[in-house]
Amino acid sequence: MAETPPQDLLHAAREAQAKAYVPYSHFPVGAALRLADGRIVQGCNVENASYGLSMCAERNASFAAVTSGATSFREVLVVGETAGPIAPCGACRQVLLEFTDPAAPVWLVGRDGTLRTSLAELLPHAFSPRDLDSGE
């Protein structure tokens, strides 16, 4: 039996997806993060005419969470209009890893499919804060 994502996270991600600013790709993406304290933070992708300045939903949600004072995420959900489960780009995977336990649930939701995975599976052999020598 396929697992079902948490409905509160899915609702928050879809709500954010509806606010995406995508005049060029027409490809809205929404993200929702459950923080360590249980709060949910949303993000959507925002495009720019100078394409390199666009920002993904996952990073927007991550940066909004940090702005609110949170640096620990315990669950991630991303929703997009792909046929199967949407996959975060490499940059988003790396940013999420900064604040999320590698074993935490990551839900990837598309039109016709959902996948429960983790950052450890999405970003094997990742460079993480643990790799930095503090010099102490």
Image: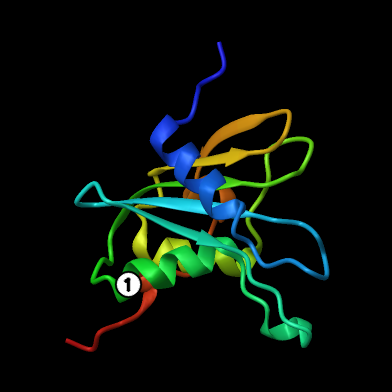
Look at the image and name its color scheme: rainbow
Q: Which residue is tagged 1?
A: 66
Q: Please indicate whether residue 65 sits to the left or right of residue 57 in the image.
A: left
Residue found 62% across the figure and 31% down from its top: 114
Image coordinates for residue 68, horizontal then vertical, percent: 27, 70
Give above or below for 116 relative to 102. Answer: above
Give above or below for 128 relative to 124. Answer: below
Image coordinates for residue 59, horizontal then vertical, percent: 52, 68
Q: Quadrant of residue 19?
A: bottom right
Q: Quadrant of the N terminus?
A: top right
Give above or below for 130 relative to 30. Answer: below
Determine if residue 83 is in view: yes
Q: Nearer the viewer, residue 71 or 51?
A: 51
Q: Quadrant of the C terminus?
A: bottom left
Q: Nearer the viewer, residue 38 or 74?
A: 38
Residue found 26% across the figure and 66% down from its top: 70
> The residue under label 1 is which amino acid type?
Val
Q: Please indicate whether residue 19 sits to the left or right of residue 136 in the image.
A: right
Image coordinates for residue 13, horizontal then vertical, percent: 51, 47
What secondary structure is found at the residue carrying circle 1?
helix
- What residue occupies the far top of the structure in this picture? 1
Q: Nearer the viewer, residue 114 or 46?
A: 46
